[in-house]
Amino acid sequence: MESKPLIYQFDDVQVDLRAFRVLKAGSTLALEPKAFEVLIFLMNHRERVVEKGELLDAVWKDSFVTPNAMTRVIAQLRKTLGDDVREAKYIETVPTRGYRFIAEVEVKEGQSASNGHGEAVLSLPQAATVEAAKPKTPFRLSRKILVSAAVIVVLCVAAAIVWVARTKSVPAEERVARRATVSRTMQVTASVGLDSYPAFSPDGSSIAYSSDRSGSFEIYIKQFAPGSREIQITADGEQNLQPAWSPDGKMIAYHSRHRGGIWLVAALGGAAKQLTESGSRPAWSRDGRMIAFQSYGLPDLSQAAFGSMPPSTLWVMPASGGTPKQITQLGQPPGGHGAPTWSPDGKRIVFVSNDIGLSQIWSVAPDGSGLQSFGEEGGNYYDPVYSPDGQYIYLSIASGNFRLWKMRVSPKTGLPEGERLEVANTGAMLTRHMTVSPDGKRVAYSAMTMSNNIGSITLAPRSLTPSGPPVLLTQDTTYRKLMHIFSPDGKQIAFNVWRQGADTEVWVMDADGKNSRPLIPEPARLLGWLPEGNRLVFGSRGQVWSADLKSGKQTLLAGYKEASEEYRGIGGFGRLSPDGRRIAFNSREGGAINVWVAQFGSSPAKQLTFDREMMGFPSWSNDGRFLALEIKRGDNTHVAVMPSDGGTPTQLTFEPGQNWPGTWSPDNDKIAFAGFRDGVWNIWYVSRDGKTQKQVTHYTKPNLYVRYPAWSPLGNQIVYEYAETTGNIWLMELK
């Protein structure tokens, strides 16, 4: 007789252990296997705290992953089950420790039946209910242990049954792809800096790539033949990136970060020719007649930097020169459009749209028609590229840990069909800028890692010049630390902590870097301090909350309509006014990012800027009278200032490059900003009238960046995000 499967029941959710299915109110929920395992583990250990390390060891014991993977799965479970981190019904977060399953659970016996469409549905006999009560006596405890042991046995048997069944139902070629597709990996370059953007030559005999080994990014060619030498193609110091071979192998298109635009150079080297005055990420059509590109340059070179941000769109133009044609429109789809790749038949261009909290894959015809979404959600997507036969698209996904995937695409629709297949789990290294060899048997990529900490520079009181070299206040490089804001008395620093695949948390530390500790679990985006200095304000799920610094107790301050477009910026980037009454934030309503201000107890929010490129990332002066802004003009960004009640912004910086504002000096006269000048990021400040600019740090490496400078209210310190990206070119040989 066939044994009946155990079924967990809590609220209106049923979990069938044999069928590996979860139903809510009778409807099947889509859960990835790891999410299912986490759910079972938490239910089996309900009514106690499951430590984070214990959960990682139990579910990911055979994989090298970071805690980001667990955080992402928990977030997916909550979203799918209809749970909430702040008003938990099922999974409760125990800050800094782990999770507790708090719903009442019944363990039932039932049987799976078909609904006539090949799908299993649950039949639950009334007489087969087993109580799952909290143990009160030694006898009940022994019984619970026996039940748990039975559940583990059933799970093991069920896993084997399901694996065999699924394997038999999958075509042979896909079964091979699911088990393993990589026969070996090898390192191609060995620079101590950053090697990136590899591109296979049309005959597969060599790879072109960018490297900063000379102090600036130049284009090199590495040949695979034994004893062959490496060739440097450019040597002009203009920060040359993103090489792309012409299909005939005679030319290389690339982006010059310093001069801007797309350039062409002979594959054997020589004088470069400018093809466009702006744009980046060139991609040749298979017939060599056209080049697609994104309209704006790359934001930065960090490990997980998006390939584009608004208002970038896609364009195509003849490779021989001529007038570019725009093929995607701002806001359609939302985000910045970038990283284009042509299908081998030339009928589609696949690209990624990116914005704060948004990353999706799309495709469009070269004439701009037929825009369609791949429907991919649940991660940050990077660098899609077609296999030479056009049957697959390879891409990197940062969701939890870093993985390289491939998905089959339909020859008729150009859209994905079937299950996405994992090629490799690359652990702490993110595979970027993939390129596939002409025979489809090798994938080259840049394996990038990032060291991220909080930097600090001490300033002399009167001259505001550095009184010593920069120091690092933190030494834990496993996650980003950003959005730094000093407490009103200058003694503490609040900041966001962000891990791949998870929402941000809020941490607090002393101004000298000591006593760093988490205060608010994800998802929480830091907005600022209340004036009394004992509470922090943050945005979460379309609402604004405060948290007590000592107890961590959270209080709802104001509700914002999550469906209303102008309020979405509070979840991404926002700043609380010094008096604690207003929030300035980004909104992309209308396509481009602009600045809005919301006041507690008042509705609706007020739009302050109406720019068609970008005006965003506001920062309040300490007296609340002004806002510093970042404005975008072509490939450059600049610092601007405007009255906080509205008015005409005044541009303060004009040098080519990137200028990203942070916070103000205590006297409201100067604005600290992260400046990208001559290929290197440093901390600067500019006076409110724009007449004085001063460089505060003097870094020289092109593979590092600084962000979010925060000026202490005491005037003697500026802290900032400091990150250095390193990486080399690697090669995977596919089975």
Image (spheres, rainbow, N blue to C red):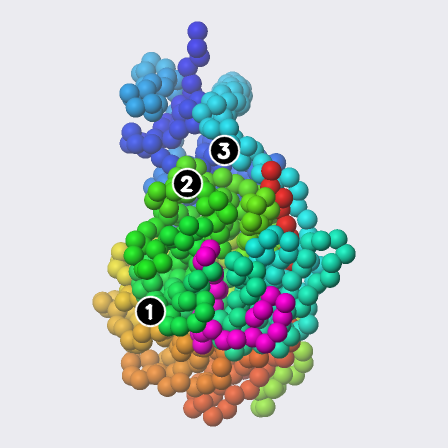
Residue 685 in sight: yes
Q: Residue at x 38, y 41 (%)?
A: 410
Foreground label between 2 and 1: 1
Q: Which stretch appears magenta?
A: 265-287
Q: Nearer the viewer, residue 727 or 49?
A: 727
Q: Secondary structure at mark 2?
A: helix
Residue 49 in sight: no
Q: Residue at x 43, y 72 (%)?
A: 321
In the picture of the structure, the residue carrying the numbered disc 2 is 77
The CA span between labels 3 and 1 is 42 Å
Q: Residue at x 45, y 76 (%)?
A: 277
Disc 1 crowd rating (10 Å Cα; few below 14, some 14-19, many 20+) is many
In the picture of the structure, the residue carrying the numbered disc 3 is 174
**Image: 694 above or below 40:** below
- Residue 562: % across, % down: 29, 56
Mark before the other along the chain sequence, 3 or 2 = 2
Kindly give the residue lying farthest to the right in the view shown.
227
Q: Amino acid at mark 3?
A: Glu
Q: Secondary structure at mark 1?
A: loop
Q: Nearer the viewer, residue 409 or 129?
A: 409
In the picture of the structure, the residue carrying the numbered disc 1 is 592
Kindly give the residue lying farthest to the left in the view shown.
603
Q: Quadrant of residue 454?
A: bottom right
Mark before the other along the chain sequence, 2 or 1 = 2
Q: Which quadrant is the N terminus positioned in?
A: top left
Magenta part, dominant SS: loop
